């Protein structure tokens, strides 16, 4: 068996341009999905009663597998501390730590804590994001629109505070609006058009304010969607413009285009961002 060098390991684990790198990504995606399936089955008491031992062994198998992957990533990373502190580095760590922590929390009284720790294994599914270029495009679009979204939620918070305070004054504790925070909870539920019905206005003025709140909820619910859609469109156009034909130097090609739509020349393999 021929051992891979550090540079070869980096190309296989962190890159997707080589056949070996693509095979590694596909195998890792399959392992992540299977580990999530084990987590789902383990949360079902009827299934756990029959094959609990098998699920336990499989969980440890996946934990050891992802621990080995995490250690190899640290070993072959060009900047180890940058990887450890990165988003994906923290996700990789969160995916394996809970199982080890469960060993050091003995006693029946701590079983609830252990179960809460085991739920953090769901972070493994976030590891899929690094292998999907479309997910990276969406992530960049969210980053580009973060200030607009912050302004939107700030305005929404002001509206929730305003309508909640109004209903607290108009309806009062006798109708369920016992405090401003409770009234703000009603405003959030109403603006988001959920409408649980646990707190409802009874006075004509309160019902009029509630009607305005509902209509405003329908009006503003599309705002963040429009913001993200606009940024996503710009990000996709930017990605298409980045792909230029090596023969005629013209841009505007789709991310998965194999040949130039102007001269018919072969396109280069797109670089992952």
Image (tube, grey):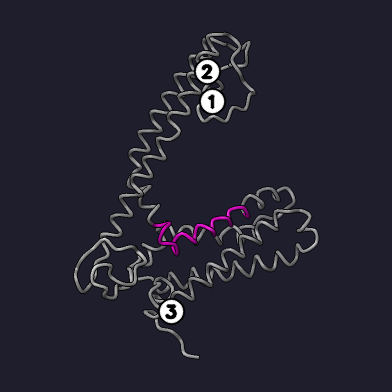
User: Vertically, is 155 above or below 139?
Assistant: above
**What residue sits right under mark 1 in the picture?**
190
Task: Kindly indicate whether the residue at mark 3 contacts the one at mark 1 (C-beta within 8 angstroms).
Answer: no
Res 77 → quadrant:
bottom left
Q: CA distance from mark 2 to mark 1?
A: 8 Å
Local SS, label 1: helix
SS class, disc 3: helix
Where residue 223 appears, x then y in whole percent? 40, 35
| In-image side of 114 versus 92 (left or right) | right
- State how far apart marks 2 and 3 are (Cα): 59 Å
Q: Nearer the viewer, residue 268 or 86?
A: 268
Which residue shows up at 56% across the image and 68% down it?
A: 30
Q: Earlier in the sequence, mark 1 or mark 3?
A: 3
Q: Which mark is residue 19?
A: 3
Q: Is residue 119 magenta?
A: yes
* First in sequence: mark 2 vs mark 3: 3
Tag 3: Cα neighbours inside 10 Å, few (<14), some, or many (≥20)? few
Q: Earlier in the sequence, mark 2 or mark 1?
A: 1
Q: Residue at x 23, y 72 (%)?
A: 263
Observer-nearest of 66 and 110: 66
From the image, tell me which residue sits under label 2.
210
**For this rendering, which residue is in front, 16 or 216?**
216
Helix or strand or loop: what does disc 2 sit on? helix
Mark 2 and mark 1 residues within 8 Å of each other at the beta carbon: yes
Q: Position of residue 183 (x, y in %)?
A: 54, 20
- Looking at the figure, which quarter contains the C terminus? bottom left
The residue lying at 32 percent from left, 68 percent from top is 271
- Magenta segment range? 118-136
Q: Position of residue 123 (x, y in %)?
A: 54, 56
**Drawn side of residue 101 relative to residue 9, left or right:** right
Residue 123 badge: none
């Amino acid at each position: 068996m021929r051992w891979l060098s550090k540079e070869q390991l980096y190309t296989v684990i962190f890159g997707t341009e080589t056949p070996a790198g693509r095979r590694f990504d596909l195998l890792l995606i399959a392992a992540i999905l299977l580990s999530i399936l084990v987590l789902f089955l383990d949360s079902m008491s009827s299934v756990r009663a029959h094959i609990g031992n098998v699920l336990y062994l499989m969980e440890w198998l996946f934990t050891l597998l992802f621990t080995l992957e995490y250690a190899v990533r640290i070993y072959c990373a060009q900047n180890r501390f940058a990887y450890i502190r990165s988003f994906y580095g923290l996700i990789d760590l969160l995916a394996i730590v809970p199982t080890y922590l469960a060993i050091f929390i003995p006693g029946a009284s701590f079983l609830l804590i252990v179960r809460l720790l085991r739920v953090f294994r769901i972070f493994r599914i976030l590891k899929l994001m690094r292998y999907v270029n479309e997910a990276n495009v969406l992530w960049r679009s969210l980053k580009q629109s973060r200030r607009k979204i912050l302004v939107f939620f700030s305005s929404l918070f002001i509206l929730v505070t305003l309508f909640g305070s109004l209903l607290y004054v108009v309806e009062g504790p006798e109708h369920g609006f016992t405090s401003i925070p409770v009234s703000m909870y009603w405003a959030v539920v109403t603006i988001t058009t959920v409408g649980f019905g646990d707190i409802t206005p009874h006075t004509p003025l309160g019902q009029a304010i509630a009607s305005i709140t509902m209509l405003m909820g329908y009006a503003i619910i599309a705002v963040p969607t429009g913001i993200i859609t606009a940024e996503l469109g710009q990000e996709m156009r930017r990605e298409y413009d980045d792909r230029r034909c090596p023969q005629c130097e013209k841009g505007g090609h789709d991310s998965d285009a194999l040949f130039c739509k102007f001269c018919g020349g072969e396109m280069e393999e797109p670089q992952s961002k």
